[in-house]
Every structure is written in structure tokens, then in C-alpha cells.
Image: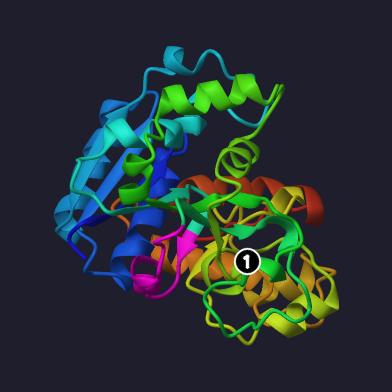
């Protein structure tokens, strides 16, 4: 698997959280040796932490700074700064011997072996991703890593986890100029990364089983949870839209918190509640090089939040 790599797109502000993404990746997939960070700017502190992370896990970790001016032709919505579309430059950013590249957003956590992503047949595909909004029919087999084309209802992928088949990307000349030409030809206006990728690659997308490779934490209906929780989650994507549940670094929950203060109205079929998935993220955070910094930041936030909720100060200690 030496010709495969992982790219993580992160701003400098979120670099500290990407350390946990990398940590979870390396703990569960020690065979992965090449990781790239795509960003518009990285401070000396972030670069130092990345260097320490690379040393700790014995990986090649390469930061790549993106010139956002090259993406000025894109009209992105408020959620997407220009550099977040760095995947459009991937053809020219990576070494030519890379065969597959997995792109992850910072709000993901790798909880298992992702080697199947580098082994599934992608001869006819340029990218792979899970359908947005669980857009599959009820006949889809939840035990399979991928969906058949006819099983997919919403023909659009979620941009948080995308696998690029670099062999076919190069073969078909898919580069920044190619994306820009398609953007103009199809009259796109305000877009997100997943909209552009889904449109440009629409005839060559392999749809991944969400339950394995992009388990999203947003509230879903009972059928979806019954159907998908039997699968073995390999990548979790934190997408809940409620403030304190939105991202795992915002708040860690212990049992007393869950019982007394955070009475989640969660789906009864959800085997791993959002609070438990946050706790899993923090378990990986303990092995990150910047754990104390993350814990201190979260404790301050939690103390402030609970002082409002309870009308008194809550003083969690640093572990």
C-alpha cells in the first residue's frame, strides 16, 4: 500500500484538531506512511505539532500550502473558504506514483481498518464517496463496502470523505483547468465542494457504504439506524448541527453529564450515541501530541457552559 496516501484539509485554526484525526488514522492503520496537510496557512506552532506527530507515528507528514488565488473563479458559499476546495488541485500536488488518495475533513475520526478503500475495484471510477443524506434504497446490502449504481437515489456524495483514483484522474486529464471548464460549461453558481465533485465526476463515482466509511452523526430516522448500525464503522464524520454536539472537540461527555445535563433526544436505534462518539474522539485525543492543550481548551468551555446550565461552576480536572 506504499502508493496510497491520505490528505487532510485544514485551516490553521483547526490544525490542532486535525492532530486527532491523524492520531486515530495511524493507530488503526499503521501501514499508512504518507499523509499530506492541505492548508492556506500554517503557523509555526501547527508545523511543530505536525512534525512531532510525524515522529511519534513514524509517518511522512507533508504540509502543502495552497495559493487560494488560483481558486478565485469559484463562487463558494459561506461554509466553504476557497482553500477547502484544495482537492481540485490534487493532480498537481501529489507525487506521480500515488495511486489512490483518501481526502478527509478535520471533523472525521478513523475508528478501524480502512485498507478496503485501497483494495476495492475502481477501474471504471475516478472518485468514491458515500451518498449524501443516506441516499440509498432499502434493498441496499448494509454488509457491502460499496453500493450498486442502481441502489443510489441521491446521486451526490458527501465531501467529508472522498477517495481519488489518481490513476484515472491522470488518465483523463482531470486537473484544475478541467474543473474550471466544467464549472463554466454547466453554469454553476454558488457551490460546495461536494456539489462540484458530484457534478464533474457524475458518470464515474463509486458509492461507498456510509455505515463503514462515512458514518455521520446527524439525527436520522429509525429505519436508517436499524439498517446501518450492524456495520463496522471505520470512519466517523461529525455532522450534527446542534451547537454542543456539532464537533467532538467542543465538549466531552461523561456518564454523569449525559444523565444530568445533556438529555439528548437521540434515536432509540442509534447504538453509538453522539456523546459516546465524542468520548471516543477524546480517547484518541489522549494519544495526540497536543492533548493537554485540547483538554484545557475544552475544560474552559465546559466550565462556562455548565456554569450557565447549573447556575454554578463545574471544575473538571485535567487527566
Query: Taking 170 as reference, is 303 left or right?
Result: right
Q: Nearer the viewer, residue 46 or 214?
A: 214
Asked if residue 119 is among those painted magenta in the image, a careful observer would answer: yes
Image location (x, y in percent) of residue 137: 77, 73
Query: Taking 98 as reference, is 75 left or right?
Result: right
Asked if residue 302 is among those painted magenta in the image, a careful observer would answer: no
* Res. 174 visible in picture: yes
Few, some or many C-alpha atoms within 10 Å of disc 1 (few <14, some 14-19, many ≥20)?
many
Task: Give the mark count.
Answer: 1
What residue is drawn where x is 79% and y is 57%? Answer: 310
Which SS class for mark 1? loop
Q: Nearer the viewer, residue 239 or 308?
A: 239
Quadrant, the N terminus: bottom left
Image location (x, y in percent) of residue 168: 36, 48
What residue is drawn where x is 55% and y is 50%? Answer: 160
User: In this picture, which residue range is highlighted in magenta?
Assistant: 109-124
What residue is drawn where x is 36% and y is 24%? Answer: 66
From what the image shows, is residue 136 above or below residue 232?
above
Please give the residue where the numbered disc 1 appears in the rendered image: 253
Amino acid at each position: 500500500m506504499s502508493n496510497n496516501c491520505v490528505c487532510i484539509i485544514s485551516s490553521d485554526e483547526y490544525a490542532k484538531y486535525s492532530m486527532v484525526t491523524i492520531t486515530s488514522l495511524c493507530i488503526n492503520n499503521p501501514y499508512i506512511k504518507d499523509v499530506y496537510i492541505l492548508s492556506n496557512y500554517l503557523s509555526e506552532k501547527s508545523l511543530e505539532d505536525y512534525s512531532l506527530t510525524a515522529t511519534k507515528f513514524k509517518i511522512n507528514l507533508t504540509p502543502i500550502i495552497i495559493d487560494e488565488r488560483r481558486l478565485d473563479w469559484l463562487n463558494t458559499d459561506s461554509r466553504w473558504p476557497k482553500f477547502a476546495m484544495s482537492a481540485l488541485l490534487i493532480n498537481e500536488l501529489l507525487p506521480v506514483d500515488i495511486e489512490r488518495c483518501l481526502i478527509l475533513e478535520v471533523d472525521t475520526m478513523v475508528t478501524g481498518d480502512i485498507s478496503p478503500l485501497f483494495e476495492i475495484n475502481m477501474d471504471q471510477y475516478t472518485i468514491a464517496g458515500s451518498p449524501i443524506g443516506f441516499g440509498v434504497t432499502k434493498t441496499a446490502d448494509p454488509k457491502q463496502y460499496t453500493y450498486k449504481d442502481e441502489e443510489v437515489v441521491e446521486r451526490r456524495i458527501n465531501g467529508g470523505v472522498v477517495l481519488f483514483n489518481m490513476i484515472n484522474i491522470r488518465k483523463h486529464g482531470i486537473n484544475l483547468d478541467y474543473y474550471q471548464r466544467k464549472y463554466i460549461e454547466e453554469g454553476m453558481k454558488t457551490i460546495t465542494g461536494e456539489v462540484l465533485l458530484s457534478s464533474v465526476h457524475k458518470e464515474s463515482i463509486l458509492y461507498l457504504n456510509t455505515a463503514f466509511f462515512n458514518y455521520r452523526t446527524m439525527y436520522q430516522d429509525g429505519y436508517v439506524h436499524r439498517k446501518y448500525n450492524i456495520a463496522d464503522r471505520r470512519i466517523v464524520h461529525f455532522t450534527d448541527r446542534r451547537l454542543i454536539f456539532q464537533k467532538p472537540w467542543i465538549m466531552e461527555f461523561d456518564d454523569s453529564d449525559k444523565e444530568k445535563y445533556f438529555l439528548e433526544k437521540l434515536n432509540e436505534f442509534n447504538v453509538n450515541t453522539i456523546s459516546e462518539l465524542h468520548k471516543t474522539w477524546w480517547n484518541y485525543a489522549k494519544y495526540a501530541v497536543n492533548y493537554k492543550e485540547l483538554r484545557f481548551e475544552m475544560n474552559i468551555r465546559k466550565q462556562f457552559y455548565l456554569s450557565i446550565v447549573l447556575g454554578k461552576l463545574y471544575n473538571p480536572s485535567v487527566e
